[in-house]
């Protein structure tokens, strides 16, 4: 096949050659914080239906044997590596609380995959951190390369969030396996060929299979990395450079400049948004704005006559007086999440229990949340704004039953790179999840201490085993 560029080789050489010492200190610090945050929200999802289904499926199909074993976070004992990866990655996304890159939720891939593999292989903390950062940098460039054009209507024409997600697993897995440049070239090719199709039906029908996809892509990406290291892949070279390659396979989108964008000097890792709330990313700012106003004025749900928000957000105003039919349906609804915040208190799985999704009081309150119908941010606009380093600004007006009117506005939600989490906030995320999962105080505190000192750990086994209940 005619080779037009050399990007696959360049990315392969970068990831194969990346050393811990090459990575800036602020990026390493952020990787440790994101580890603590992601593990915490995964623990919080321990008993959600998607996670329990993933556990039973892993047990039925993978058994309990095998040399490579890893901890299933928030449960007793270990499982075969692929089973642990499947469950931990599913759990990382189930509450939609982990992260947001402007390309999706890569953390649900690279944190569970890297930590589970590092445990199974008894790798040091520096190797883990290098795989997390390097794997993401390659993932993000490939994801940016095949993003749809600026005028693409994501709501009507679909968005392949799970399409490129598999690279968030295979790339760090390949790094931990020690793949050389040629093996990485083949691994990138195999990952492209194992890519999920654009799954519009999941979003149209609000299926919770959405969360399980992260488990499947992580498991498949890990398997492909093992095949690459064993020399079991062939004739899949240069998928990013040849006619009929990855861009052709993914609807023909091909954004010049992304695959080699400041490779090795610009770390896009610092652009990841840590989610403050268990909800879709475009629900984060309205929730933060409501939280700020409630803390300032002390009102309760019973005091509220109406909440008005501008701008509106495409496909984030879902409301059905009969109730919400899935966890995802609630997570993607601003009216629902604001009402869950006011009536269910502390964020966590209780926001999305079957009882909450059909609670008459919650639905009544959600019906009084009004989104601006004249000024609506299209999803493509939202992502363009985030990609450019900013975020859509939200204005909120709360009318109380006594006639009082409260106004607030907010642009950068907590966790955005311009309003970042500090160590205490990451620790809080972890403690919330640890408490929900039933992790004891001794293991909770030990995990926090080890996570803060990740780069000095000689073997990540102890860190991972802190997560066993």
Image (cartoon, helix red, strand yellow):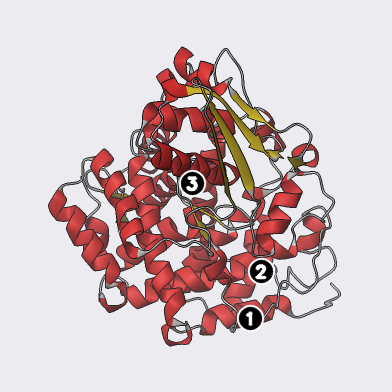
- Residue 224 seen in this snapshot: no
Residue at left 65%, top 58%? 386
- Residue 409 seen in this snapshot: yes
Query: Percent position (x, y) of residue 46?
Result: 34, 39
Residue at left 49%, top 45%? 288
**Label 1 sits on residue:** 263
Closer-to-camera residue (321/134)? 321
Sooner in the amino-acid sequence: mark 3 or mark 1: 3
Between the C-alphas of marks 2 and 3, the distance is 22 Å
Sooner in the amino-acid sequence: mark 2 or mark 3: 2
Q: Is residue 424 left or right of residue 82?
A: left
Q: How many marks?
A: 3
Task: Please rate how many residues cluster around mark 3, counting C-alpha atoms within 10 Å: few if below 14, some from 14 to 19, many from 20.
Answer: many
Numbered tag placed on residue 215 in the rendering: 3
Label 3 element class: helix
Most distant residue in the bottom direction: 21
Q: Quadrant of residue 425?
A: bottom left
Image quadrant where one finds the C terminus = top left
Which of label 2 and label 3 is nearer to you?
A: 2
Task: Please rate how many residues cluster around mark 2, counting C-alpha atoms within 10 Å: few if below 14, some from 14 to 19, many from 20.
Answer: many
Sooner in the amino-acid sequence: mark 1 or mark 2: 2
Closer-to-camera residue (47/66)? 47
Q: Is residue 371 left or right of residue 447?
A: right
Label 2 element class: helix
Question: Quick check: 17 above or below 371?
Answer: below
Query: Percent position (x, y) of residue 11?
Result: 64, 77
**Label 2 sits on residue:** 141
Q: Quadrant of residue 87?
A: top left
Between the C-alphas of marks 3 and 1, the distance is 28 Å
Query: Percent position (x, y) of residue 133?
Result: 49, 71
Closer-to-camera residue (190/420)? 420
């Amino acid at each position: 096949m005619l080779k037009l560029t050399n990007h696959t080789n360049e990315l392969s050489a970068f990831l194969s050659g990346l050393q811990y010492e090459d990575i800036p200190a602020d990026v390493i610090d952020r990787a440790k914080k994101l580890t603590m945050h992601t593990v915490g929200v995964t623990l919080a999802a321990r008993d959600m239906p998607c996670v329990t289904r993933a556990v039973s499926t892993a047990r039925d199909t993978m058994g309990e044997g095998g040399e490579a074993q890893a901890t299933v976070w928030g449960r007793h004992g270990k499982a075969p590596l692929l089973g642990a990866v499947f469950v931990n990655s599913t759990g990382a996304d189930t509450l939609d609380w982990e992260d947001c890159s402007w390309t999706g939720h890569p953390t649900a891939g690279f944190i569970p995959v890297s930590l589970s593999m590092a445990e199974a292989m008894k790798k040091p903390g520096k190797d883990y951190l290098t795989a997390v950062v390097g794997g993401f940098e390659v993932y993000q460039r490939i994801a940016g390369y095949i993003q749809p054009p600026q005028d693409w209507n994501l709501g009507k024409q679909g968005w392949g969030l799970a399409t490129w997600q598999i690279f968030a697993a295979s790339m760090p897995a390949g790094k931990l396996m020690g793949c050389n440049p040629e093996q990485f070239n083949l691994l990138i090719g195999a990952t492209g060929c194992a890519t999920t199709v654009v799954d519009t039906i999941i979003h149209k029908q609000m299926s919770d299979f959405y969360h399980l996809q992260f488990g499947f892509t992580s498991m498949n990406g890990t398997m492909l990395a093992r095949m690459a290291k064993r020399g079991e892949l062939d004739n899949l070279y240069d998928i990013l450079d040849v006619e009929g390659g990855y861009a052709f396979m993914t609807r023909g989108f091909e954004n010049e400049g992304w695959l080699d964008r400041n490779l090795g000097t610009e770390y896009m890792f610092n652009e990841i948004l840590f989610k403050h709330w268990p909800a879709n990313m475009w629900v984060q700012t309205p929730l933060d704005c409501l939280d700020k106003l409630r803390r300032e004025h002390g009102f309760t749900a019973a005091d509220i006559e109406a909440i008005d928000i501008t701008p509106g957000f495409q496909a984030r105003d879902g409301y059905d007086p009969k109730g919400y039919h899935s966890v995802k349906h609630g997570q993607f609804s601003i009216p629902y999440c604001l009402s869950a915040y006011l009536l269910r208190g502390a964020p966590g799985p209780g926001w999305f229990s079957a009882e909450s999704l059909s609670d008459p009081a919650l639905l009544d309150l959600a019906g009084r949340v009004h989104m601006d119908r004249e000024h609506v941010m299209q999803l493509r606009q939202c992502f363009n704004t985030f990609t450019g380093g900013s975020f859509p600004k939200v204005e909120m007006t709360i009318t109380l039953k006594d006639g009082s009117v409260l106004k607030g506005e907010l642009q950068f939600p907590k966790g955005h790179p311009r309003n970042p989490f500090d160590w205490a906030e990451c620790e809080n995320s972890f403690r919330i999840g640890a408490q929900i999962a039933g992790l004891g105080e001794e293991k909770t505190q030990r995990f926090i201490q080890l996570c803060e000192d990740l780069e000095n750990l000689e073997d990540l086994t102890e860190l991972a085993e802190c997560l066993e209940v």
